[in-house]
Image (cartoon, rainbow, N blue to C red):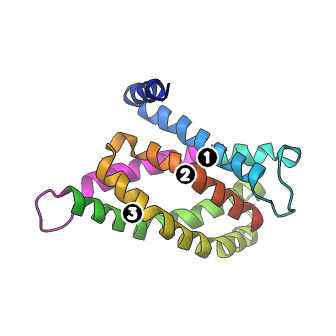
């Protein structure tokens, strides 16, 4: 069954990569938010379906599909085609390490505050005070956690996963990551 789903996904990815990544990324961001809402306590300490906020999940799906999917896709292609270990012929391990370093030193410091800022805009509109508060309250801890989680995953991703499946790999791991950032976004409102 899993092999069949993977084959269908791969076929759709070849046939319509942008739409496939759009749908997949949105669904997986949504699953992360659903997980955060049903498992982790919110700012009012309530969990479960009784206190479920559907609009919050829709915002996560929107962010994942419309905002993160095209950025993530372009970022992985950039890393693959432009980032190589300098001064050597092609070396998969050194190239993967170089990509992890560029990825982790550039993407999270931009993407993490951007996520919190955009989610605040989607929640509250263009309230600069709220946006600034959320970014300040959430970014540092999230970046530290990011650097504890993602370098190892990205090293495996860049070394062993085909480029067209890298965003999916990140998105699958991101179910857990999205649970965490959705939780952080909610408790620091």
Nearest the viewer among 71 and 60 is: 60
Instruction: Tell me the quadrant of the picture where the C terminus can be found.
Output: bottom right
Q: Which residues are magenta?
A: 63-91
66 relative position to 159: left or right: right
Asked which quadrant contains residue 66, the reply is top right
The question of residue 66 being in magenta is answered with: yes
**Residue 189 versus residue 35 in the image, above or below:** below
The percent position of residue 6, horizontal first and vertical second, equals 44, 30
Q: Which residue does the numbered mark 3 point to in the structure image?
A: 103
Q: Is residue 20 something one can see in this rendering? A: yes
Q: Which residue does the numbered mark 2 point to in the structure image?
A: 174
Assess whether mark 1 and mark 2 are in contact (beta carbons under 8 angstroms).
yes
Q: Which residue does the numbered mark 1 point to in the structure image?
A: 29
75 relative position to 109: left or right: left
**Residue 24 versus residue 140 in the image, above or below:** above
Main SS class of the magenta portion in the image: helix
Marks 1/3: CA–CA distance: 20 Å
Q: Earlier in the sequence, mark 2 or mark 1?
A: 1
138 relative position to 109: left or right: right
The percent position of residue 36, horizontal first and vertical second, equals 71, 53
């Amino acid at each position: 069954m899993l092999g069949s789903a993977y084959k269908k996904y791969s076929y759709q990815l070849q046939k319509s990569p942008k739409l496939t990544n759009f749908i997949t990324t949105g669904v997986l961001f949504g699953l992360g938010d659903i997980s955060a809402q049903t498992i982790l306590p919110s700012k009012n300490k309530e969990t479960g379906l009784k206190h479920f906020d559907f609009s919050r999940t829709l915002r996560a799906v929107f962010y994942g599909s419309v905002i993160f999917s095209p950025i993530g896709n372009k970022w992985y292609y950039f890393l693959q085609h432009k980032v190589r270990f300098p001064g050597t012929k092609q070396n998969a391990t050194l190239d993967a390490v170089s990509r992890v370093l560029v990825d982790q030193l550039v993407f999270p410091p931009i993407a993490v505050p951007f996520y919190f800022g955009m989610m605040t805009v989607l929640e509250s509109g263009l309230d600069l005070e709220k946006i600034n508060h959320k970014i300040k309250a959430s970014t540092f801890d999230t970046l530290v956690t990011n650097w504890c989680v993602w370098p190892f995953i990205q090293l495996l991703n860049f070394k062993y996963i085909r480029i067209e499946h890298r965003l999916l790999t990140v998105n699958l791991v991101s179910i857990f990551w999205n649970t965490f950032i959705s939780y952080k976004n909610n408790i620091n409102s």
